[in-house]
Image (tube, rainbow, N blue to C red):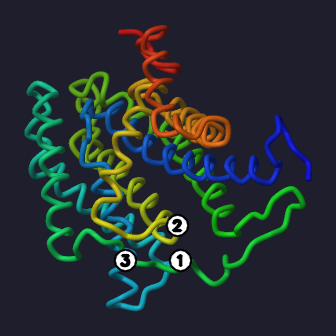
């Protein structure tokens, strides 16, 4: 059996695949956080709960309406995005002129409320959600066995991340969004509905979290605590990439996922803390993050 640094190649590439899958979820979730913070200046602590909501909406659509995975990939983000729009318009928008701490506390309380509700209704144990039959099985690549669904997760998450980056950086809508965060009064003077843009931004971030939740449902069990277990790591990813940096969130998400996977191979005991160690080092050397701009 071929080895690298004394480690079987199949085991090494298997852990790299796990790291890449984790990195896909880190990238999608940190992208949503970066969009909301970069454009609204809100630290959205409810992001993990919105990720969990996406998975639960997909699960409930299947259980009660018979709507399967492929439709849920579109319907669940739309439902959670609409929920996010209602929250932003009725509650969060009232906090924009206050200290950012109020937004953090509000979204933290919202996350606790959502998770507590689902924990009361469904308990702490996870609910199974099967992968679509079209993506069942796997492919033998010679040096490793690649489960088809996990390969799909990596590809579609990368496409979603790049699509969001193009929307914000390369389209007229994205230019309006960026301009509205810099000078909302001037943009509104040109006839642009700034409050609607801000609502759309928060809904987009919530929808991205829900999309990640639907992708995660067949990989992990659908559980009220699935967002809580991930959100702290995702915040670390955003800090390393640079708060508000869209491309930083994407690149850093994949990089730290792979770093975590490699650590599991060479030094498993440190795999749970390697991301936070990297975060501490980056903050010491570059406080604004790898892709962030200094104030």
Contact, mark 3 vs mark 1 (Cβ under 8 Å): no
The residue identified by callout 3 is: 127
The answer to whether residue 26 of the structure is visible from this angle is yes
The answer to whether residue 173 of the structure is visible from this angle is no
- How many angstroms separate mark 3 from mark 2 (CA)? 12 Å
The correct choice, above or below, for 87 with respect to 101 in the image is below
Q: Position of residue 17 (x, y in %)?
A: 68, 52
The correct choice, above or below, for 281 with respect to 26 in the image is above
The image quadrant that residue 143 belongs to is bottom right
Question: Would you call the spot at circle 2 few (<14 residues within 10 Å), some (14-19), or many (20 or more)?
Answer: some
* Between discs 3 and 1, the one toward the N terminus: 1
Contact, mark 3 vs mark 2 (Cβ under 8 Å): no
Q: Residue at x 39, y 54 (%)?
A: 209
Residue 127 vs residue 178, the one in the foreground? 127
2 or 1: mark nearer the eye = 2
The correct choice, above or below, for 133 with respect to 22 in the image is below
Question: Would you call the spot at circle 3 few (<14 residues within 10 Å), some (14-19), or many (20 or more)?
Answer: some
Q: Where is residue 134 in the image (x, y as percent from the top left)?
A: 67, 81
Q: Is residue 121 left or right of residue 12?
A: left
Secondary structure of the residue carrying numbered label 2: loop
Residue 266 vs residue 282, the one in the foreground? 266
Q: Position of residue 294 (x, y in %)?
A: 41, 9
Q: Is residue 195 left or right of residue 278?
A: left
Residue 185 vs residue 148, the one in the foreground? 148
Secondary structure of the residue carrying numbered label 3: loop
Q: Position of residue 34 (x, y in %)?
A: 40, 35
Q: Which residue is drawn at 8% across and 27% down?
A: 98
The residue identified by callout 1 is: 70
* Between discs 2 and 1, the one toward the N terminus: 1
């Amino acid at each position: 059996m071929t080895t690298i640094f004394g480690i079987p190649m199949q085991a090494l590439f298997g852990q790299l695949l796990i790291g890449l899958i984790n990195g896909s979820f880190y990238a999608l979730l940190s992208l949503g956080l970066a969009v909301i913070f970069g454009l609204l200046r809100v630290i959205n602590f409810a992001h993990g709960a919105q990720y969990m909501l996406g998975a639960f909406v997909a699960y409930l659509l299947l259980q009660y309406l018979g709507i399967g995975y492929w439709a849920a990939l579109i319907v669940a983000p739309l439902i959670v995005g609409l929920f996010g729009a209602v929250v932003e318009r009725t509650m969060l928008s009232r906090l924009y002129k206050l200290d950012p701490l109020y937004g953090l506390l509000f979204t933290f309380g919202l996350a606790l409320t959502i998770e507590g509700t689902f924990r009361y209704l469904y308990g702490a144990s996870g609910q199974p959600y099967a992968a679509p039959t079209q993506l069942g099985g796997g492919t033998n690549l010679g040096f490793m066995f690649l489960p088809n669904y996990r390969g799909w997760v990596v590809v579609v998450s990368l496409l979603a991340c790049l699509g969001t980056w193009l929307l914000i950086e390369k389209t007229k809508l994205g230019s309006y969004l960026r301009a509205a965060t810099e000078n909302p009064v001037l943009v509104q003077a040109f006839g642009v509905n700034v409050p609607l843009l801000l609502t759309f931004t928060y809904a987009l971030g919530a929808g991205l979290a829900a999309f990640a939740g639907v992708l995660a449902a067949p990989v992990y069990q659908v559980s009220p605590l699935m967002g809580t277990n991930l959100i702290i790591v995702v915040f670390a990813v955003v800090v390393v990439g640079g708060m508000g940096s869209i491309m930083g969130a994407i690149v850093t998400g994949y990089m730290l996922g792979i770093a975590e996977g490699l650590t599991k191979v060479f030094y498993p005991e440190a795999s749970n803390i390697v991301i936070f160690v990297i975060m501490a080092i980056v903050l010491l050397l570059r406080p604004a993050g790898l892709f962030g701009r200094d104030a």
